[in-house]
Image (cartoon, rainbow, N blue to C red):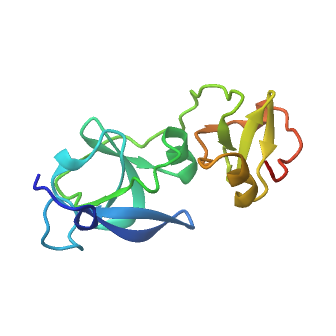
Amino acid sequence: MKAATFSTLFYSVGIVMNGGMVSGQYLRHDGDDLHRPITDSTALKEGQAVTCYEGEDKVYRWEEGKLRWYPSSEIANSYNIRWRPEMAHVDCQHLEFGEDMPLKTEHREAQDGDIVTCFGHEEKVYIMENGKLRWFPTPTIAYSYTRYWRPEIIVDCEIYPFGPDMPLNEN
């Protein structure tokens, strides 16, 4: 792989999956054409989210040398909550396809201090505090507690009690 600057390696592109906007990048292996998708599978990372140049409406997981389709964003989130910004746009014509991805149900339990979101309600972000989920009603409130308030894990919120919403931290 030829050395390149960050600006020559990535090019943002938006695609639609199950009615919602997701983001991704055209990954490239040289500096010739920003709009050419990657054609070399060795540039893909294990577990990376992938869209195909020929069919941008589907998102796959690159796993053990095969593309495995995520039938929903909920399933994609169950494997990697940060799959959207890590997505690669590739030429899939010469890649092998595997079985569809099932919902991953094995998750660690949330612990105090974890920033989490809930299956099926990924738009809300919580912090686990004293065994209770406490919602950050706004990004400003979340940022007043921590700079890194993006969810670390996705949980089944039906098994956790909820505490009061988090107020603005003025300290």
Identify which residue, 145 or 45, lies in the foreground: 145
Residue shown at the point (72%, 52%) measured from the top left: 144
As displayed, is residue 56 above or below residue 116? below
Q: Position of residue 51 (x, y in %)?
A: 35, 59
Count of labels shown? Answer: 0
- Residue 14 placement: quadrant: bottom left
- Residue 133 placement: quadrant: top right
In screen coordinates, is 163 left or right of 108? Answer: right
In screen coordinates, is 26 left or right of 1? Answer: right
Identify which residue, 61 or 143, lies in the foreground: 143
Residue shown at the point (56%, 27%) measured from the top left: 106
Q: Position of residue 44 (x, y in %)?
A: 25, 47
Q: Residue pushed farthest front?
A: 171
Q: Position of residue 143 (x, y in %)?
A: 68, 53
In screen coordinates, is 136 left or right of 163? Answer: left
Identify which residue, 79 or 7, lies in the foreground: 7
Residue shown at the point (57%, 66%) measured from the top left: 20
As displayed, is residue 65 above or below residue 87? above
Residue shown at the point (14%, 68%) measured from the top left: 31
Q: Position of residue 131 (x, y in %)?
A: 80, 27
